[in-house]
Image (cartoon, rainbow, N blue to C red):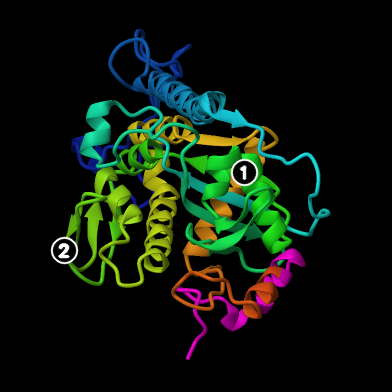
Amino acid sequence: MSDQRPDGGYGWLYGEDRPTRPTPRQPGSDLPPPNLPPPGRRGTGSVPPASRRPRRKRGIGRVIGLLVLAWIVFLVAVPIWAWSQIEKVDASPATGRPAEQPGTTYLLVGSDSRRGLTKAEQKDLSTGGDGGGRGRTDTIMLLHTGGGPSLLMSLPRDSLVEIPGYGRTKINAAYAYGGPKLLVRTIEKNTGIRVDDYIEVGFGGLVKVVDSLGGVEICPKQRLKDKDSGLDVQKGCQNADGRTALAYSRNRHAYATQDIQRVQSQREVLGSIAAKAKSPWTVVNPLRYLSVANGASGSLRIGDDVGPIALFRFALALSASMGGEGLNCTVPLRDFAVNWDPDRAPKMFDRIKTDRTDQIGDLCTKDGLPKT
């Protein structure tokens, strides 16, 4: 074979354009050098870093999962514990009750009971001591929920009504004479509305609930000072602690219309409590969540036939009635002497009995007096 290039040159003999020849392949030359990881997995050490990261992530995920589970258990356990602390009472009259009615009507009572308050607390809250007996009811409200808007209706404590066995007198005397049963029977007799569930809150209970929420907003339209209730607040919206909220709910002497204005203040405080309680922060903050549950459970007395679901529905209906989704008003009144209107009041009661709160219209007013 000739060494001459195809172009006839012999330059390669003198080092010019020397052709290269492939190096013969040795057996095993395709294998990686010893002690080195395969291509694409180069790193330090014998265990690649990528294989360690998932383990760390799995550990963090397990911790988060345990924390979430513990939080769920906490959210469920606290209401169960709180429910076991609530006092139960027999509030259902044995006879003479209206028949079953559509929807659900709750009787909400704020009693002047000093139960659970020390003498020092009674002095600080300006409640005075217990006068013996069952006490009286500073707050009486009917809360109806059903097919129409939820309705919260105040029955002023000085309302003159027929109390079975005692004649015509102020409605709050029924509680003093015969406790929850006689109060329920009195309301059913004078309104024709069947009371399905009974819920009572004492003085101390209101204070504890408000303080557990970090206070509630009140918006007095004038400067208020009353030595009997211990109230001393300026005009305008402000945050009120439990002591101030209680005094604001009890005060009547600072108003010209007395009890008629007081029931409006009571609904205002209830609405603020409901708005604060349903805030997500109440659930997110474990201290507040536990404090609210503890305060509420230690302050309530409920009918022995009221279950947890009924109590939950009560809270939702109360929030709706005071949050703009429902109605809140005073029983229709004829005059400032707190006599019920003989024409408008029965119409209001009929719409509640038949679960037609969407047809109440102008019967529902803040002070109970007709719109002019």
Q: Position of residue 68 (x, y in %)?
A: 47, 29
Q: Where is residue 278 in the image (x, y as percent from the top left)?
A: 45, 50
The answer to which of 170 and 202 lies nearer the viewer is 170
Q: What amino acid does circle 2 point to?
A: Gln
Residue 362 falls within the magenta-colored stretch:
yes
Badge number at residue 158: none
Please give the name of the residue rendered at 54% of the width and 35% of the height, measured from the top-left corner: 301
Q: Residue furthest bottom?
A: 372
Q: Quadrant of residue 354?
A: bottom right
Determine crowd level at label 2: few under 14, some 14-19, many 20+ residues with C-alpha closer than 10 A: few
Please give the name of the residue rendered at 37% of the width and 68% of the height, measured from the top-left corner: 261
Q: What amino acid does circle 1 point to?
A: Tyr
At mark 1, the secondary structure is strand
Q: Quadrant of residue 208?
A: top left
Relative to 363, 268 lies left or right: left
Q: What stretch is highlighted in magenta?
A: 350-372
Dot 2 or dot 1, earlier in sequence: 1
The answer to which of 87 and 32 lies nearer the viewer is 87
Please give the name of the residue rendered at 70% of the width and 35% of the height, measured from the top-left corner: 305
Query: Which residue has dot 1 on it?
Result: 198
Query: Which residue has dot 2 on it?
Result: 234
Please give the name of the residue rendered at 66% of the width and 45% of the height, measured from the top-left corner: 197
The answer to which of 45 and 370 lies nearer the viewer is 370
Separation of marks 2 and 1 at Cα, in angstroms: 35 Å
Relative to 253, 328 lies left or right: right
Q: In which quarter of the image is residue 199?
A: top right
